[in-house]
Image (tube, rainbow, N blue to C red):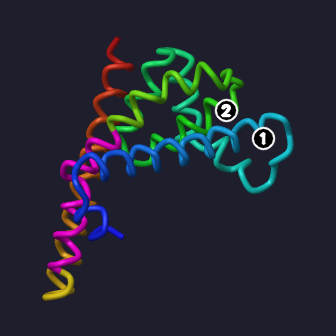
Amino acid sequence: MIEWILSKPFAVAFGFLTAVACVRSQCTYWVGRGARAGVIRARWAKRLTSEGAESARDKLERFGWPVIPLSFLTVGFQTAVNLSAGFIGWRWWRYTLAAVPGWLAWGSVYAVGGLAVFAAIAHVAQRSPILAAAVVQVLVVAALTATAWTRYRAKRRATNG
């Protein structure tokens, strides 16, 4: 699939990836709405009460609509924000208007370079699976370190005033 997208002109890749972001976020939003209505309980209950979901709800309530498009530039937090927007009862049209810039940003990031990174890792894995695993581990450790550092700094700021 990655090769198919990379082989297309930028406009086609961008359009396809933007549509993927649109469909995925809308589905996640509606799962949140279903959970709010009590239709979906057991499976999503843990996700809706997790630390990530609570953080997403807090940020949505605190900062409003800008959180939605900015969440598309993250991994993981995006899902929590979309789910939370449905769960806390954001109106569909308001959520959708806020999400459009995020869809465009997500499509741009992946069309320009995001998929190329995945393709490069896949190419390395064909030649040396061990090297590819090492590269992925380094990227994961870097992401976890950045997340831990950001949380540490936020807690430190909160306790110091």
- Magenta region includes residue 147: no
Badge 2: residue crowd in 10 Å (few <14, some 14–19, many ≥20): many
Lower sequence index among marks 2 and 1: 1
Please name the residue shown 27% across and 46% down the image: 11
Which element type, helix, strand or loop, lies under badge 1? helix
- Magenta region includes residue 118: yes
Task: Name the one closer to the observer, 19 or 95.
Answer: 19
How far from the left and from the top, in percent, is residue 134?
18, 75
Above or below, 33 against 9 in this view is above
Q: Which residue is mark 1?
A: 34
Quadrant in which the N terminus appears: bottom left
How far from the left and from the top, in percent, is residue 70?
37, 29
Residue 154 quadrant: top left
Q: Which residue is mark 2?
A: 86
How far from the left and from the top, in percent, is residue 40?
81, 48
Left or right: where 22 falls relative to 70:
right
Task: Indicate the amino acid at tag 2.
Answer: Gly
Task: Name the one closer to the observer, 143 or 105.
Answer: 105
Q: Read off the magenta span.
A: 106-124
Quadrant in which the C terminus appears: top left
Above or below, 113 against 57 in this view is below
Q: Are marks 2 and 1 in contact (CB under 8 Å)?
A: yes
